[in-house]
Amino acid sequence: MKCAFCGIVERGELVVFEDAVSIAFLDHRPLFPGHCLLIPREHRETLADLPAALVGPLFANAQLVARAVEMAMEAEGTFVAINNRVSQSVPHLHIHIVPRRRKDGLRGFFWPRQAYPDDETMLRVQEAVRGAVDQLRR
């Protein structure tokens, strides 16, 4: 079965931006009008699957589209987000670019946030993530 977003790349549906690296199109079920999805043209399931050489160009395009969405929708800002696997409705890397206004009804990151129970737990998590970063850099 073909990826739904790869089909959009082929058909060019609701496109608002495209170049050799990526394509942005309107989300068919937007949080707000102007909600766009920016995807790499080449099928990549997650951010971790994106070749390092494409990270900069893709995010430069995300910056451009975010500015364009703000301008076109007369928005006060944007929410820019990526889901990797969990809550990723289509298994093709996509960056949500959502126009935002104060008091628009969206809360935080759409889920409840929780403080660390204590400083010791926070420091253990910090050390675990730092260790993983060191391993991945080797």
Image (cartoon, grey):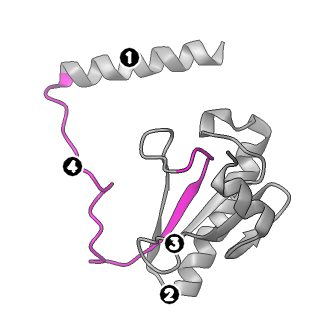
Which amino acid type is marked by label 4?
Answer: Pro
Q: Residue furthest left?
A: 117
Q: Residue 53: horizontal and vertical position, in percent?
A: 79, 39
Which residue occupies 26% across, 77% down? 103
Q: Which residue is mark 2?
A: 74
Gap between marks 2 and 1 measured at Cα:
42 Å
Which residue is rendered at x = 46% and y = 82% of the image? 75
Closer to the chain start, of discs 1 and 4, is: 4
**Labelled disc at residue 19:** none
Residue for point 78% across, 47% down: 42
N-term-proximal mark, 3 vs 4:
3
Q: Secondary structure at mark 4?
A: loop
Q: CA distance from mark 1 to mark 3?
A: 37 Å
Image spot of residue 123 (x, y percent): 28, 20
Q: Amino acid at mark 2?
A: Glu
The quadrant holding residue 101 is: bottom left
Query: Which residues are drawn in magenta?
Result: 90-119
Q: Residues within 10 Å of mark 4 (few under 14, many from 20)?
A: few
Q: 102 or 43: which is nearer to us?
A: 43
- State which mark lies toward you, 2 or 1: 2
Cα–Cα span, label 1 and label 4: 24 Å
CB within 8 Å, label 2 to label 4: no
Pinpoint residue 28: horizontal percent, then vertical percent: 53, 71
Q: Nearer the viewer, mark 2 or mark 3?
A: 3
Would you say 59 lies left or right of 127 here?
Answer: right
Say which of marks 2 and 4 sits in front. 4
Q: Amino acid at mark 1?
A: Glu
Name the amino acid, label 3.
Answer: His
Q: Which mark is residue 127?
A: 1
Instruction: Tell me the residue that label 4 is attached to.
Output: 112
Main SS, magenta region, reads loop
Q: Secondary structure at mark 1?
A: helix
